Amino acid sequence: MRIGVVGTGYVGLVAGTCLAESGNHVTCVDIDETRIQMLRAGRVPIYEPGLEELIRTNVKERRLTFTTRLEEAVRNSLLIFITVGTPSDDDGSVDLTAVLAVAEGIAKAMDGYKIVITKSTVPVGTTRRIKKLISGATKHEFDVVFNPEFLKEGNAVDDFMKPDRVVIGAEGPQVGETLKELYAPFVRTGKPIIVMDIESAEMTKYAANALLATKISFMNEIANLCEEVGADVESVRGAIGADARIGSQFLFPGVGYGGSCFPKDVRALIRSGEDAGCELRIVRAVEATNTAQRERFFRKIQKHFNGQLAGKKVAVWGLAFKPGTDDMREAPAITIIELLLEHGALVHAYDPRAGEAAKSFLPDGGVTYSPDCYSALEAADGLVLLTEWPEFRNPDFDKMATLMKERVVFDGRNIYDPLRMRAMGFTYHGIGRR
Ligand code: NAD
């Protein structure tokens, strides 16, 4: 099939590349000229494992091209995906400016029948709004579809290639069939393609993200209670995760969720509830718990130093909101580092991938970026671990002990064993550990 993908961010670039990999001809469009120039020159503007190689192959095979001209992509394609950002406004509502601008641009460029597929996460009603907007601006026939994306940054290529399910919100059976045909190569192991009405598909994306965020906030509250009453959340986690009704994923306590999706999607759902006169008490609590969790972790650090953080050298391992990505959007590291700096600490940070991206999210001049994890530790008064990158899981503890001025570790992801850490002479603070 001939496909246009508008927006070459984490979703658009991965979707476009994977759709090309399955034999389609894909034109990727972005408004950002630098990004398109980079892609044309064979450089990838984001870090996502396996993506660069796949782009290279598909460009070489002439199935994948990049342009800033939306019109060119629309004319060349039957299917056009909208994958631009849908950030939060100050009041939690979704800023649809980019999505609507793209829809209008598509309408103006249409030269025949097209299927316009919204993949950006949008509130219920948006796809129908897009349909109205397009029909007001073109005389050509078209269909609209909502097709949420469930990929996880850090594993995006694999997730797109082997989805747990594909959800398609469409009107009428024919367009649903076309989309099923498009996705058939990705579900050969029998994973379902679930076709439903557009509104339910829009709601599915928010419900899925909010439920995952709920699991995280729930476990953070249980971890906090474990700390107070003398239980160990890691034992609790293992045992409740073994219950098939609960499942073992997303039960990891930590410093709270972040990223470009959970925080904004949880806020958007709360806002949708308010607009509809239907208060979502659980979802509201999920957000409040998440904010409190970051502050609680900071207070733990502060308490260890008897409130005297001024002049303390604090090493931070991990800045990205999760391992496997350079995405810093709403990363817990931002809140925690800002609090450390506000209280006079000297922050020396290291992240295997997000160091460069972090610079535009953290206060100017406030953080020293270390070239590797060990140099961040030189003469440090403590280590704060915020992202569980694989390389932090089994470091050279002897070297750490030699480098650090004070052997104290604040493990925001519970990746170390408290007993082993204490046996090696470290003071260890985890989340909800005995
Ligand atoms: P992103 O910010 O990484 O990328 C968006 C891209 O769209 C940017 O390159 C930007 O330059 C481009 N863009 C903006 N306006 C444009 C326009 N008018 N014309 C052409 N290009 C334009 O965003 P993302 O993380 O890929 O997310 C995109 C959407 O997918 C969001 O709605 C998000 O909620 C959803 N989503 C994201 C993820 C994820 O893990 N990032 C997962 C599932 C769904």
Image (tube, rainbow, N blue to C red):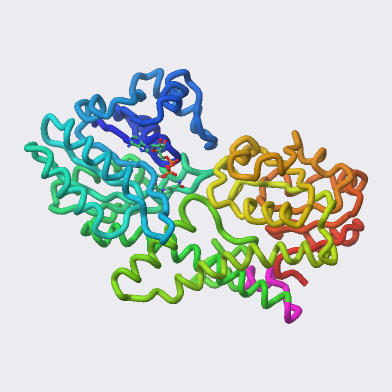
- Magenta residue span: 228-239
Q: Residue at x 66, y 72 (%)?
A: 223
- Asked if residue 231 is among those painted magenta in the image, a careful observer would answer yes
Residue 136 percent across, percent down from the top left: 11, 44
- Asked if residue 133 is among those painted magenta in the image, a careful observer would answer no
In this rendering, the answer to whether 280 lies above or below 12 is below
Q: Residue at x 48, y 57 (%)?
A: 262
Residue 11 percent across, percent down from the top left: 41, 41
State which quarter of the image contains the C terminus.
Answer: bottom right
Q: Where, by quadrant of the figure, is residue 65 drawn?
A: top left
Q: Residue at x 40, y 74 (%)?
A: 280
Residue 369 percent across, percent down from the top left: 73, 38
User: For this view, does 118 lie left or right of residue 75?
Assistant: right
- Majority secondary structure of the magenta segment? helix
In this rendering, the answer to whether 306 lies above or below 64 is below
Q: Residue at x 87, y 42 (%)?
A: 378
Q: Residue furthest bottom?
A: 229
Q: What number of labels is visible? A: 0
